[in-house]
């Protein structure tokens, strides 16, 4: 699922290409800058992908994926979080829980929550931390994240506490 950043870069490139066609002398420089940004984002993934290919084992890339998930931006960060959601183990799951506790609403909702949910029953020891993390968001954000959190509880084979239940749609 492409994120808002991906759509923003794509929209910038398109609008700048149109501006260049219309004669804006700086537009082509902006297009080149945006394309360099895309190339840099994808270049950050290369070491992790090389490690996976070298070893044949995705878990071998966990340290690089954790670094990307914590410090990269845009596509490399999203790809690293998605990959960590598919690699079983305490280290990848703890990184995801830490990210859920410290990331903004959009990233937690769209990327980190689904990656955590993919860990299924292994999430059980972290359920209370995740529940506390939701409390720092605004009420509308909490409602949306509560839905994701309920799915995580379900994947862990547990029933979410009633405090996490999202309010009915009419109360938003």
Image (cartoon, grey):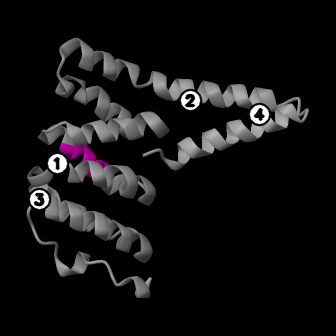
Q: Quadrant of the C terminus?
A: bottom left
Chain part drawn in magenta = 93-99
Distance CA(mark 2)–CA(mark 1)? 30 Å
Position in image of residue 90 (x %, y %): 13, 41
Q: Earlier in the sequence, mark 1 or mark 3?
A: 1
Q: What residue is disc 3 on?
A: 156
Q: Does 156 appear in magenta?
A: no
Badge 4 marks a residue whose secondary structure is: helix
User: Which circle, 1 or 4, is nearer the viewer?
Assistant: 4
Q: What residue is disc 1 on?
A: 119
Q: Nearer the viewer, residue 168 or 163?
A: 168
Q: Earlier in the sequence, mark 2 or mark 3?
A: 2
Decide whether the magenta segment is chiefly helix, strand or loop. Answer: helix
- Quarter of the image for residue 62 reads top left
Q: Residue at x 76, y 37 (%)?
A: 16
User: Which circle, 4 or 3, is nearer the viewer?
Assistant: 4
Residue 22 position (above or below residue 171): above
Q: Earlier in the sequence, mark 2 or mark 1?
A: 2
């Amino acid at each position: 699922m492409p994120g808002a950043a991906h759509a923003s870069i794509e929209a910038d490139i398109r609008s700048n290409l149109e501006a260049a066609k219309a004669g804006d002398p700086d537009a082509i420089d902006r297009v080149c800058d945006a394309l360099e940004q895309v190339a840099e984002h994808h270049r950050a993934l290369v070491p992790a992908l090389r490690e996976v290919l070298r070893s044949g084992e995705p878990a071998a890339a966990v340290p690089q994926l954790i670094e990307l998930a914590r410090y990269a931006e845009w596509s490399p960060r999203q790809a690293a979080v998605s990959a960590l959601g598919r690699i079983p183990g305490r280290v990848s799951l703890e990184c995801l829980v830490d990210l859920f506790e410290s990331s903004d609403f959009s990233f937690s909702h769209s990327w980190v929550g689904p990656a955590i949910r993919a860990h299924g029953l292994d999430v059980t020891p972290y359920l209370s931390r995740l529940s506390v993390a939701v409390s720092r968001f605004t009420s509308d954000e909490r409602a949306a994240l509560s839905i994701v959190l309920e799915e995580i509880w379900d994947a862990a084979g547990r029933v979410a506490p009633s405090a996490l239940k999202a309010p009915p749609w009419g109360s938003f």
